[in-house]
Amino acid sequence: MMSFTLLFGLVILPFLASQLVGLAGRGSRRGAAVAAGMAMLGGLLILASLAPAVFAGEVLVASLPWLPEWGLDLSLRLDGLGLLIVLLIDGIGLLIVLYAYYYMDDDDKLGRFYLYLLAFAGGMVGLVLAENLLLMLLFWEITSLTSFLLVAYKFKDREARIAARMALGVTGAGGLALMAGLILLGQMAGSFALSDVLLAGDAVRADPRYPLMLVLVLLGAFTKSAQFPFHFWLPGAMAAPTPASAYLHSATMVKAGVFLLARLYPVLSGTEMWFYLVSGVGATTFLYGAFFALLRHDFKGLLAYSTISHLGLIVLLLGLSTPMAPVAAVFHIINHAVFKASLFMVAGIVDHEAGTRDMRRLSGLRRTMPRTTTLAVLAAGAMAGVPFLNGFLSKEMFFAETVGLPGALSWLMPVIATIGGVLAVGYSARFIADVFLGPPPTTLDRIPHEPPRFMRVPVEILVGIVVVVGLLPQLSVKPLLAIASTAVLGAPVPRLDLAIWHGFNLPLIMSIVALGGGLYYFWRRDVVFSIADRFGDGISSRVAFERFYNGLAIGSRALLAAVDAVSLRQNLALFLLFTLVLGLGAWWAAGGAVLGPLGVGAIDVATASAAAVMLAAVAGVVLLHRRRLVALVALSLAGIVMALLFVWAAAPDLALTQLSVEVASIILLLLMIRFLPSDAAAESGASARREAARRLPDAAIALGAGAGAGALVLAMLSRPFDTISAWHIANSVEGGGGTNIVNVILVDFRGFDTLGEVAVLGMAALGIQAMLGGLVLPGRPARGADGRALSPPVMLRMLVQPLLPLLLAAAVFIFLRGHNMPGGGFVAGLIVAVALVMQFVARGIAFAEARLRQDMTRVLGVGLAICLVTGLVPLAFEKPFLTSAHGYLAGVHLASAALFDLGIMIVVVASLVLALVSLGRLSQAGAR
Amino acid sequence: MALALASIVAMLVGGGVWLLLRPRSWSVVLGLTLLGYAVNLFILLSGRIGSRQPPLLLEGAGPIADPLPQALVLTAIVIGLGMTAFLVALALRGVASRGADADDADRIGEGPIDHHDAGDAE
């Protein structure tokens, strides 16, 4: 249980702290730094308390079910490899926090930087500890996103934005491939739990999907770890502040890809494909990065390419699959993280002090920065593989592993390794020689000097580790390396002998050749530069990415422009056409029959005459739609036919609703007519021709849609049918306390739906109010034939006044009977709204507004609140939301659902009044 | 019976779609109203109709109509009214912002396209 809490704490702590730091950062820089440092330190302490168990060989696992049906659990595991990487994350993280406190300028938002940094650390720790493949993927994406935020930290700088986008584009695309790969892997292994997957190696490698899965997983790993040809985002990512570069782009995030390969090593490795792909890409990257590192004039770029090269070295080792190669890989992960982070920090110090990163301008800094120079020389020595420093040991192990491979590889691999060693010595030498040696600098704006004391402390600690590991490997790093390698191999490590002196053997000769050759290579570097100048600077894949990216952007814009003419009409036509094609396709594929076994039935008078009147109504609307008032009359005719059809179909509730809605919508449309500009005569010239040209396709779509809908109705009605309403009918009186089943369904069985629907109605009304608020439209004043302004007719005024109480009484009646007989909140609400609105129409908006004392938005809220509260009360009695109760009180049958219905009624009234008054106000504004 | 009902739905859909594709927002509102009728009728028909009683549980009533489609359609009618009102407001807003004589549905949504990040790509 203890380890359970601690494991989750390890992941959650940085995320929690990131939020705190973000807040603290507004107040004080120091507060932010202390909080961030405490988070890292806390992580280290948790790790320390868990470490004894891990060193004893245990694998700590903590698990919480999350989405078990998807195989996704919140499960974490801590083994040797996890311990090692989390140690790097939190340990180097702590140093980075201290370093950044001095590095970042005062006007930089330090809190924001720490926020991203900690969120990244949390993602990274989660990635490393994830016991579930899908969870691992989730954290993988978090590291990509936070890396994006850190690279784009100086977001006002265009270069930084482009670099951030490129980093996210490459690692994000890799993440997608990885997702596919890991899902495949989980399916092949039969589980997404890492413990199961790691044991399923034989089954996975025998699976026919293995090659596809391997390529996808490798794409993820290679993009993240900047392997050729996906390496180009890493030099760009140097646009991030140097502390972030030191942390993410040398020590931790770029190791995520390598970590993934190490983590899945027992499952994926051991095939020929693994060997050729992984070691091939690794070797290419190793040489490529090492070669181009020398050519960078920006020393941060030099370090970035060197990182690419070292990552290639680690990948190459993992690909070799000899027994000791993964051990060497893990060892180099540690060593590289330590010396490269310190080198980046040195680079940051120099940049900070000298104001430039251009090695052609820098020179002789050892005079003014002797301590920093010492540190830099030691760290760069480790990078080059100089004896007695940690880089030498893992590089020797690497050389030893390249010796003794079968076939042509027996000479090829040692040669590649030695060439890589030569190149590494070359660029390391250039970094030291150009920056720290030579004559004093001449072109600098200021004289660089030693940085603040505590800015150098992190570097000193890291360089101290470089030296201690280099001198006393057996005593310092061996236990850690042993448990981490055990976790990678999935088996006990072969004999581990971390001596500096292995005797005079081939690897030592290779080291000597690399050192000597590297110094010579550095000495003759002008030759290399002149060759490189002739062949470009090796950023071709970056250019290719930019072209690809821009091509995508241009292509999608062109596609959008082709499909979307920014015309509602054209979009509608396309949408309808598409729907038609889909419907026709489905119909055709299903055999193309329209009529079912029941046939069309006899023709009866009621429906036939309804169809005839409807024909007249629709024809009226369609043909005369330009004559708005006439069209409106025809439309209301169609509405009446609908209401009659509802009556005929034994749906009295619908008929009532339809009729009252009809009144409201006619008033609405009348108001609209008033503000529409007078309909000009048919368009002339080009627009008329365009209009005529559209008639034919439009008519075809309309006919097709009509025929399709009609056929659908025929198909439906001619097939037998089993109702699904039996339950509702049986339980209406018992459970809902009402005999009007429709109303009981609305306010009880499907009350939640109804709640949603009235909420939508309310939102529409609020939207209308917002859209029309403050709008002034030049409405056409109503004028009679003689040109005088017309006031509402006297007859209407006289009629409407006594109508109000009558209508309200009718509404109350309909509301009260609703639960048992046709009626209910919806209809009653519509009637009240119509009664009120008719007052506006007859008496003018000013009259009505003077008497409308309630703010309708508030009334709307009250109605919704009544609905909600009626729904929530049952929760107090441990019944589900919106359970209704009913019973007899003093001889009167009452149901709690009636209260819900009241809420509905209030919302309907308020929404309609709000909408119509908003429209009515327009006329007032127009009249003024 | 089925034929007549099918032709009613067909007329409403055909007319509604035609009006939807006309250039003025006014006709779009009319068209949507017709389409709304058609859809409501269609849903109601999915419960089948015939010589039956309204869905009220009264003493001595015969077979009753299917209540579920009726409940669905009832809210649909009210929501339809809300939508019509919203559309009317939208159209008037368009009239106000584009000047009085162009209530062209072709133009709804027209405006400067957001080329926010376009400069970065080059």
Image (spheres, rainbow, N blue to C red):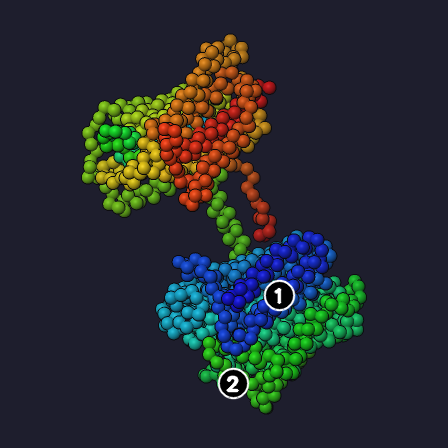
Name the residue type under label 2: Arg
User: In front here: A382 or A105?
Assistant: A105
Which residue bears the numbered disc 1?
A42
In the displayed structure image, the side of residue A847 where residue A199 appears, left or right: left
- Above/below status of A70 relative to A691: below
Instruction: Specify which label sits upstream in the sequence, 2 or 1.
Output: 1
The reply to whether residue A411 is in sight is: no
- Above/below status of A527 relative to A830: below
Q: Quadrant of residue A604?
A: top left
| Quarter occupied by the C terminus of chain A | top right
User: In front here: A870 or A240?
Assistant: A870
The reply to whether residue A182 is in sight is: yes
Q: Position of residue B24 (x, y in %)?
A: 46, 29
Tag 2 and tag 1 share a subunit:
yes
Foreground label between 2 and 1: 1
Identify the subunit bearing mark 1: A
Secondary-structure class at tag 2: loop
Whole-angstrom CA distance, mark 2 to mark 1, is 35 Å
The numbered disc on residue A617 is none
Name the residue type under label 1: Gly
Q: Position of residue A759 (x, y in %)?
A: 47, 36
- Above/below status of A252 relative to A652: below
Q: How many marks?
A: 2
Q: Dot 2, crowdedness within 10 Å: few (<14), some or many (≥20)? A: few
Q: Position of residue A711 (x, y in %)?
A: 27, 36
Which residue bears the numbered disc 2?
A495
In the displayed structure image, the side of residue A32 where residue A827 appears, left or right: left
Identify the subunit bearing mark 2: A
Q: Are marks 2 and 1 in contact (CB under 8 Å)?
A: no
User: In front here: A322 or A420?
Assistant: A322
Secondary-structure class at tag 1: helix
User: In front here: A119 or A369?
Assistant: A119
